Amino acid sequence: MSKTTEQKCMEILKSTEEVADKVLVNKQELVALDKRRQQNREAIRELEKNTDNSEKKVWTTIGSMLVKMDRAKALELLKKDQQQIEREIQILQSDQKILVNKHRDLEHFNPYTGTHLKPLDPKEFSALKANLPML
């Protein structure tokens, strides 16, 4: 092999490995965010479930600090955090699809089909349901 061919092969391998590393990092971030989302969901559920309790203030963590705050304020902060986590997960999932297809392109494989599908929103689903014949 000539030097230019070797260099070209090394560049292709390097770019393929960089994209593969990004895919793995995104996967780890998705797992961490999902774990955080589930913990948030559990905390929200617990706060909503125990509203009959006489405690007006609850202990909650903000970053690495433990803070006592009003139940309603803690619940509001948890719900905002939950929305932010879900947005971050959606962004990472869409980036992940792009990276996986880019990686497959670098390896000269066809991109995965059906990775860009989006679910019907409720309006579209009801319109479709209204136009389907009854069986």
Image: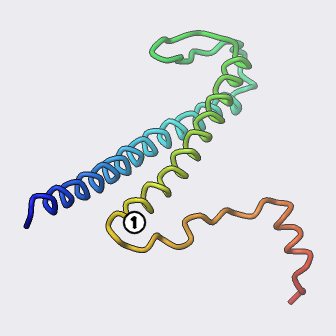
| Secondary-structure class at tag 1 | helix
Residue 58, given in percent of the width and then of the height, sits at 62, 15
Q: Amino acid at mark 1?
A: Asp
Return the residue nearer the eye: 119 or 114: 114
Q: How many residues crowd mark 1 within 10 Å: few (<14), some (14–19), many (20+)?
A: few
> Is 110 displayed left or right of 43 in the figure?
left
Kindly identify the residue that appears in the image at 23 percent across and 54 percent down.
Answer: 11
Q: Residue furthest bottom?
A: 135
Q: Residue furthest left?
A: 1
> Is 43 displayed left or right of 65 in the figure?
right
Return the residue nearer the eye: 126 or 36: 126
Kindly identify the residue that appears in the image at 54 percent across and 66 percent down.
Answer: 115
Kindly identify the residue that appears in the image at 29 percent across and 56 percent down.
Answer: 16
As displayed, is residue 98 above or below residue 110? above
Residue 131, given in percent of the width and then of the height, sits at 91, 79
Return the residue nearer the eye: 35 or 102: 102
As displayed, is residue 82 above or below residue 23? above
Return the residue nearer the eye: 128 or 47: 128
Residue 55, given in percent of the width and then of the height, sits at 69, 14
Assign the C terminus to one quadrant of the image. bottom right
Kindly identify the residue that appears in the image at 70 percent across and 13 percent down.
Answer: 70
Residue 40, given in percent of the width and then of the height, sits at 57, 33
Report which residue position mark 1 lands on: 105
Question: Which quarter of the picture shows residue 77?
Answer: top right
As displayed, is residue 131 above or below residue 119? below
Assign the N terminus to one quadrant of the image. bottom left
